[in-house]
Image: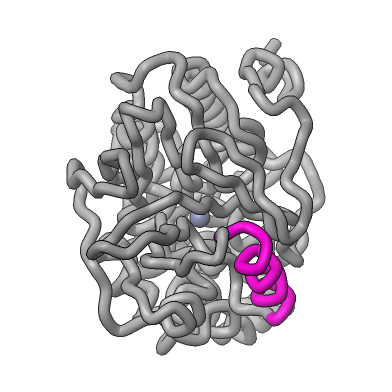
Amino acid sequence: MSLTRDQLEARLHYPLGTTLPEPGRALVVAPGVKWIRMTLPFALDHINLWLLRDTLDGREGWTVMDCCIAREEAKAQWEQVFANELDGLPVLRVIVTHMHPDHIGLAHWLCEKWDCRLWISATDHAMARLGTQTTTGFGGDAAAAYFASHGLTDPQSVAKVRARAGYYPNLVPSVPAQSRRLLDGLAVRIGEHDWRCISGYGHAPEHMALWSESLGVLISGDMILPRISTNVSVYEQEPEADSLQRFLDSIDKFLPLPEHTLVLPSHGRPFTGLHERIAQLHAHHDERLAEVVAACREKPLSAFDALPVLFQRQLDLHQTTFAMGEAVAHLNRLWHAGTLARTRGADGVWRFSPR
Ligand SMILES: [Zn+2]
């Protein structure tokens, strides 16, 4: 019997208990590190953002980590934070962990308002710029064709995916043209502390987590979350991607960090128990993979067929597209491992069966 989400979560430790920052206010979680929590109008109803006390080019101020989506409500929450939490000092730079809308949506607004630079991986910067101009991974004809090749063929869903071509630009209308490039292993000096960039794959093109050894703090972004498992998807731009293996390899890069590391995730609460959580995520995906293999032994499955195997709950269209990406990620992993073979039917749908 696998453990429930509550039982797994009970193995982690939350130093602040159930305390959350009030809207427009921050909570100090480490010296010079403040936690902001903003509401999101999605099933995932909040995002954590971070303020780091900084000195840059001789000026005192703050570094902002992640931005929230481009919505008036989010700007209003930021204005409250500026009034309440900056001690009268400016924002000196904006660091973005990855290109997803809840993280980068307001980067252009923040950088313009404070006349400061965006720091981000080159891959995510390019993909975000592209995303504001085209339809990448979230809707449109290419996405509809990709989902159809994995069995999502009912006309209503296809029409809805097509119609969502504007999903990304709607939440991220603009991205600064210039950036400072974050690279794996790069040390970024923020205030009195060095933070090391740790790249991660499988969730976003090139996610950057930041770890400060002297503070004992990891800003994990979406790579390590305490309660929900990170979305690991295959998108239409790279249909054969082995995203799940990329993700599992990436989270293992956090294993050398000390056990007492305080993890600051983008969703959920700050926690310790990093090694336990990494083990839980491996176990979670191992179980899902075993279930998918078992189901494929009964009959060849498309990713769409595998949805009820992987997700035992009702999914709306938005959740279905994420779930489809996850299902392809698990099927591709087993295909790359040689456990499953795939064949394309006369209907154009890929189906996977034991090799
Ligand atoms: Zn994300």
Outermost residue, right side: 314
Q: How many marks?
A: 0
Q: Quadrant of residue 85?
A: bottom right
Q: Position of residue 12 (x, y in %)?
A: 62, 18
Q: Residue at x 53, y 51 (%)?
A: 50
The relative height of residue 257 versus residue 120 in the rendered view (above or below) is above
Outermost residue, top side: 1
The quadrant in which the N terminus is found is: top right
Res. 352 visible in picture: no
The relative height of residue 146 versus residue 210 in the rendered view (above or below) is below
Res. 223 visible in picture: yes
Q: Position of residue 290 (x, y in %)?
A: 52, 24
The part of the chain drawn in magenta is 72-86
The relative height of residue 290 versus residue 36 in the rendered view (above or below) is above
Q: Quadrant of residue 131?
A: bottom left
Q: Position of residue 344 (x, y in %)?
A: 41, 59
Q: Quadrant of residue 128?
A: bottom left
Q: Residue at x 39, y 29 (%)?
A: 215
| Relative horizontal placement of residue 22, taking residue 342 as reference (left or right) | right
| Relative horizontal placement of residue 188, taking residue 156 as reference (left or right) | left
